[in-house]
Image: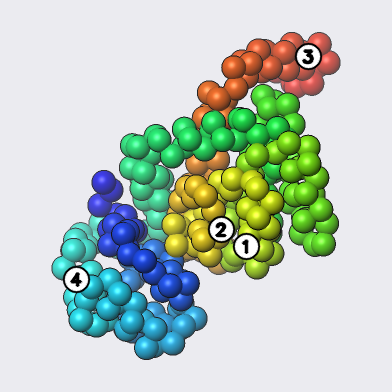
Amino acid sequence: MSDSPAARLQVLFEGHRLTPTQRRIAHCMVRRAADAPFLSSVELAELAGVSQPSVTRFAVALGFDGYPALRRHLREVTPAETGAGADLNEYQQAVEAEIENLRHLAELLADPGPVERAGHLLAASRPLPVLGLRAAASQAYGFSYFAAKVHPDVRLLDEGGTMLADRIDAAVRAGATALLCFALPRHPREVVEALEYARAAGLTVVTVADSAFAPVAAHSDLLLPAAVGTGLAFDTACAPMLLGRVLLEALCDGLPDAQARLEEFDVGAAERGLFVE
């Protein structure tokens, strides 16, 4: 198991039945894992957008006497800083934080079971709808672009509005059995509603999200977490992007003719002079 602050928090939260408000606090702490041991209950409440008593109840739900006891525990299990990164500028610190996110993802992938299960679910769905709105739209597009080279019917859902439910319905009528969702902060309410609608329509929802405590978790059958970086003005999503490529590999493993389709594409691309070599 990774010794990163985010990994330690994930372990601490696992196995507890948390309310939506408590999941919001947990999600906030995972995103601010390095700062979490030093935040007051008021500061954490402000960051999570909840009340200070909610933070206290959250700590009690985890088995502590109160928030001060939770914070003491986090400080005890947090290794002392070595100061090795003290001379890094803000851009370098953002890169180092992303490297840590990738290390955490590598630790999670030590158990390939969830990704392999997701790959088979997605491979079996004909068509395969892929949802991603706002910040996650580029992740959904990238996955769909490559998946379409091996999967016979990939349907990108990267625009919201009243047509979104119609497109989910159309996919179900065409035979879809699963939906892949990329969900990144800030989480649009429309994505949560779309996942709830998709599950009610009978689809199995596989979600790549920035945290196991993201708002989409309650509406996902299989959630695969990959943290985003928060050190810059806009979040960075290297780990979710890489997890999407890992899912593509698992998808190919679930499609017996994937290699043949790739070779067919390469032959056609060469005949058309599609790429400059």
Q: How far apart are marks 3 and 4 (CA)?
A: 60 Å
Q: What residue type is labelled 1?
A: Val
Residue wearing tag 1: 192
Residue 48 against residue 189 in the figure, above or below: below
Residue at horizontal 40 percent and vertical 55 percent from the top: 97
Residue wearing tag 3: 268
> Marks 1 and 3: which is nearer the front?
1
Residue at horizontal 81 percent and vertical 11 percent from the top: 271
Task: Name the spot of residue 272 as percent of width and height, x first.
Answer: 83, 15
Q: Distance between the residues labelled 2 and 4?
A: 31 Å
Residue 124 against residue 169 in the figure, above or below: above
Residue wearing tag 2: 219
- 185 sits left or right of 132 in the view: left
- Cβ atoms under marks 1 and 2 closer than 8 Å: yes
Q: Distance between the residues labelled 1 and 3?
A: 40 Å
Residue wearing tag 4: 73
